[in-house]
Image (cartoon, helix red, strand yellow):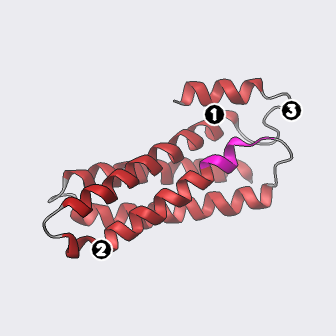
């Protein structure tokens, strides 16, 4: 997926302005991957027998999926970027991924889908951190 994201960034008539293209592409890809993984994890949690014990996990999965999808969409737009908004949404995504990853990790020994989701959240959290560091 990163290849296609990078290709799209390279073809934009105005370029990528002040952002590190590799970190931007990695963050966009990580956001969309995390959104899909969190959505699938929430659904898997709903299928578990002990669903009542997973309410917080389901909620954080849903929140993280929405924040990641919105972040990926905002980052994909290059024309007339607002760096203040970019910083704010990437920071919100980093925090959502941290919270969701921490919660999923607590269930990872019992539920493989939570372990996989925690890994995706950690990757997205790191991609957000990397992008933020390049924004100055």
Q: Secondary structure at mark 1?
A: helix
Q: Residue at x 72, y 55 (%)?
A: 86
In the image, which is nearer the foreground, mark 3 or mark 1? 3
**Which disc, if any, is residue 55?**
2
Q: Secondary structure at mark 2?
A: helix
Residue 128 image position (x, y, % from top left): 57, 52
Above or below, 76 against 96 in this view is above
Which tag, 2 or 1, sits closer to the chain's start? 1
Q: Residues within 10 Å of mark 2 (few under 14, many from 20)?
A: some
Residue 77 drawn in magenta: yes
Residue at 29% in and 48% down: 116
Secondary structure predominantly adopted by residues drawn in magenta:
helix
Report crowding for label 1: few under 14, some 14 to 19, many 20 or more residues within 10 A (C-alpha).
Answer: some
First to last magenta residue range: 72-78
Foreground label between 3 and 2? 2
Residue 93 sits above or below residue 52 on the image: above
- Badge 3 or badge 2: first in the primary sequence: 3
Could you give the CA–CA distance between mark 3 and mark 1, rounded to whole angstroms? Answer: 16 Å
The residue carrying mark 3 is 14
Q: Quadrant of the C terminus?
A: bottom right
Q: Position of residue 123 (x, y in %)?
A: 44, 47
Between 95 and 39, the one nearer to me in the picture: 39
13 relative to 92 in the view: left or right: right
**Is 97 situated above or below 20?**
below
Question: In the image, which disc is placed on residue 22?
Answer: 1
**Rendered residue at 78%/36% (across/down):** 16
Residue 27, how many percent across, how many down?
58, 44
Q: Residue at x 56, y 38 (%)?
A: 26
């Amino acid at each position: 997926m990163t290849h296609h994201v990078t290709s799209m960034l390279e073809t934009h008539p105005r370029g990528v302005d002040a952002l590190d293209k590799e970190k931007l592409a990695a963050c966009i890809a990580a956001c969309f991957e995390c959104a899909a993984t969190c959505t699938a994890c929430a659904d898997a949690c709903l299928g578990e027998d002990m669903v009542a014990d997973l309410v917080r996990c389901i909620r954080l999965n849903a929140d993280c999926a929405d924040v990641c999808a919105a972040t990926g969409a905002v980052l994909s737009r290059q024309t007339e970027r607002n760096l203040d908004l970019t910083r704010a949404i990437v920071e919100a995504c980093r925090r959502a991924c941290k919270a969701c990853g921490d919660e999923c990790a607590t269930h990872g020994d019992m539920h493989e889908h939570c372990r996989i989701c925690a890994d995706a959240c950690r990757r997205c959290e790191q991609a957000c951190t990397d992008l933020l560091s390049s924004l100055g």
